[in-house]
Amino acid sequence: MLRRLWDRLVTPIRQRGTAVFLTLSIAVGVVVGVAAAALIGAVELLGDSVSWFGDRIGDQRIAIIVVLPFGILAAWWIARRFAPETSGDGVPEAAEALAIRSGYIPSRAAPLKIVTTALTIGTGGSAGREGPIVQIGGSIGSSIARHTGLGEDRVRSLVAAGAGAAIGASFNAPIAGMLFAMEVILGNFAIRHLNAVILASVTAAVTTRSIVGEDLILRAFPHRVRDPRELLLYAALGVLAALVGWLFLKLTDRVESLQVSSVNWMRPLLWGLAVGAIAWAEPEVLGTGQEFVGSLLNLVSAESVVWGTLLLIGGAKLIATALTLGSGGSGGAFMPSLFVGAVLGAAFTDLVAPVWSFSVLEPGGFAVVGMAATFAAVARAPLTSILIVFEITQDYGLVLPLMLATSLATFLADRIHPLSVYSMALERRGVRLSRRSEVDLLDTVRVGDVASRSPAAVSTTMTIDEVQLVFDEKRMHGVPVLDGAGALVGVITVTDVLRAGGPSPHVRVEDVMTPRPVTASPSTPVSVVLEKMASLGIGRVPVVAEEDPTTLVGLFRREDAVKAYHRALGQEVHHDLDRSRLQARVAPGTDFHEVVVPAGSVADNRLLKEIPLPSGVTVVSVMRGNRVLVPQGSTRLTAGDILTVFARHGLHEQLLERMHADDTAELEMVIGNDEARFFDLEVPARSVADGRAIREVAVPGGCTIVSVRRDGDVLIPDGSSVLAAGDVLTVFAKPESRRLFVERLRAAAD
């Protein structure tokens, strides 16, 4: 009953187009704005409760030491018991969902992430709420898109919209939220996602500000560059930010990989105690640290700053954040990186002010730039870093130092640590995302790759009946026209001939041709040329040299578009294969590897079934040029083929060694006996093997089952694998053992 009612309600949404989709984007923004306000309120409420407890016992530090470990432990338990995806930062989870699960984030993630984040940060954990709200926003976008029946691409759009709305709501910075979604979550700036992200970000920012007001949102006074020579100091600050970002990443990764106890719940408890101990000495490290950052951003004089104290606070914040993020609680790295960057900028100002005589340095301005540069180094999001500062300060006075420091910090950080804080978290789970621009398939193919070379052409002095002979001979409907010097001057088509009254020995080409035709260069994307052809209603475009638009080098026709599509499709299949590998990375101890067939090796020009694959290695695909082949025993390998193999740890190295055997003698030595080889055997229906586990089938000695092919799938067998009629077993055996196994397979079941 309820299901039918729901289907009736969402049917109009499924049937309408862009207007309804953008309305849903606004709805996502409103809900994310409310969720962000709820998270801010929950963190504040729990923080006030801890302060009340401290007042009751007469010591705030003791209250933190007591409450903080149990807050993190409770967050860890909720995540472990009810929703494992709510543990950790939240940004990597949203990016992973988009890349691997087509944007699916469970609906339960939103409410439970609010609870676990409030428990972690509200009790004093050193982390930010921005990462968690990104996951909350992504979950809201995913849920609304899925439950209204939108397709996969629009699910992805609303997940990105929810994530961008989260940042827009947290900082009242909708432009930065939009850039964060495109730069970090999606990893590209695809136009089709942009409208939804912008609408959701703006709506969320307005909603959250209306609920919580301006007091709980980070703000700073405008700052100025008083002397152009200050840019040198800002450049030096960018270098320091890259080093601090590297330290942040290394420390976080180190703490995450430490093993403290075989008892799982001891980790959050011990790390929580460690954070509480740090807070005992330096309370500024507790929570998000937003108030402390706000005070640094608004400093106008270096006299109130002590660089040694600030660096001590920054170092304590680094350690406390690494411990909190590694504890299994819920919190993000966004705000802590801003905290450390602001401390770095203010301390740097106090350190150089005594020896700088060209202008008066404002610690607040350097804190602002240090904040942006450090976040850029940690998250590899320079555009987001720059725009979020613009929206926090609501001023463009620091545009030059911001761009200089963030770009320099990002460049150096990429060189000394290739992973960001978000990709590093995914790497620990065995997930490596390959970013690519989501464009039209035909954007990836150039005209020069598929156009016809040395095309037929006619001269301006030829008659129309001579041109008709060329059309008939070449089976073409149009050709380029060249003048006496060989320069391209036009195109003549069957339509032009018919318009002139048909073939005639008295009418010349130059009288009926289309002069100054549309042309393309070899580097032009095929998609651009097709757009021109469609808008002009033409079927061919001359291809001219890059340096000389009158030199004909080829001809692009509609038929070439088909070749371009197949070429692009091969590249797309290769990307989708990478995504499938990530989805299949579930078996412990196994992984995908790529092995290139060396020229002149034992695998070059041999059938796959003749190659001595180690037991436990399965060839999943064969990449040959831009084509992906489904391997069979009869597939003949050639030098340069890229084999994707699924194997247990270390076995692909054995395969590499065998691949590099360079003559037949080495192949025989690897196999161990020149009579042993690979065979394909099919399980007969109603035989002794049909419906039985491999361990229950009497496999002869000297006979190894390498793989089982079933309905196009290739399985790695073990003793518990149940065989079925029609399964094709690839076995490695001597002929006598193979014959004996065939007899046993054909035996009727009891």
Image (cartoon, grey):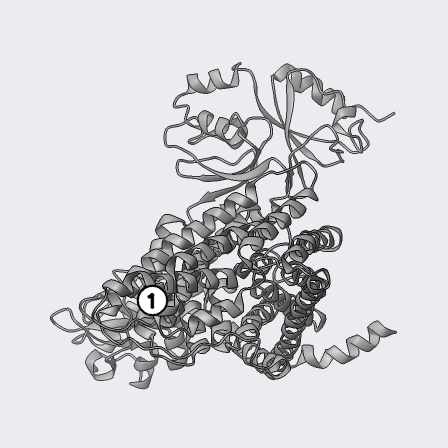
Query: Where residue 132 appears, x then y in whole percent?
Result: 61, 63
Q: Going 48% across and 17% down the picture, which residue do you hit?
A: 668
**Horizontally, is 169 left or right of 493 in the view?**
right
Q: Nearer the viewer, residue 577 or 399?
A: 399
Task: Look at the image and tell me whether residue 457 can be seen.
Answer: yes
Q: Going 64% across and 66% down the picture, which residue do you hit?
A: 136
Which quadrant of the view contains residue 401?
Answer: bottom left
Query: Where residue 330 appears, x then y in whole percent?
Result: 63, 57
- Label 1, on which residue? 556
Query: Where residue 741 appears, x then y in whole percent?
Result: 70, 20
Q: Nearer the viewer, residue 49 or 26?
A: 49
Which quadrant of the view contains residue 686?
Answer: top right
Say few, some or many: other residues with alpha carbon within 10 Å of mark 1 (under 14 / 14 to 19 / 20 or more). Answer: many
Q: Residue furthest front?
A: 58
**Which quadrant is the C terminus positioned in?**
top right
Q: Nearer the viewer, residue 430 or 122?
A: 122
Q: Nearer the viewer, residue 265 or 694?
A: 265
**Horizontally, is 9 left or right of 305 in the view?**
right
From what the image shows, is residue 466 above or below residue 69?
Answer: below
Three-letter residue code for mark 1 = Phe
Query: Where residue 109 appears, x then y in whole percent?
Result: 69, 62
Task: Look at the image and tell me whether residue 554 can be seen.
Answer: no
Q: Tell me the SS state at disc 1.
A: strand
From what the image shows, is residue 435 above or below residue 388?
Answer: above
Q: Residue furthest left?
A: 485
From what the image shows, is residue 440 above or below residue 742?
Answer: below
Q: Going 46% across and 20% down the picture, which residue do you hit?
A: 667
Q: Going 38% across and 79% down the picture, which residue do you hit?
A: 222
**Which quadrant is the N terminus positioned in?**
bottom right
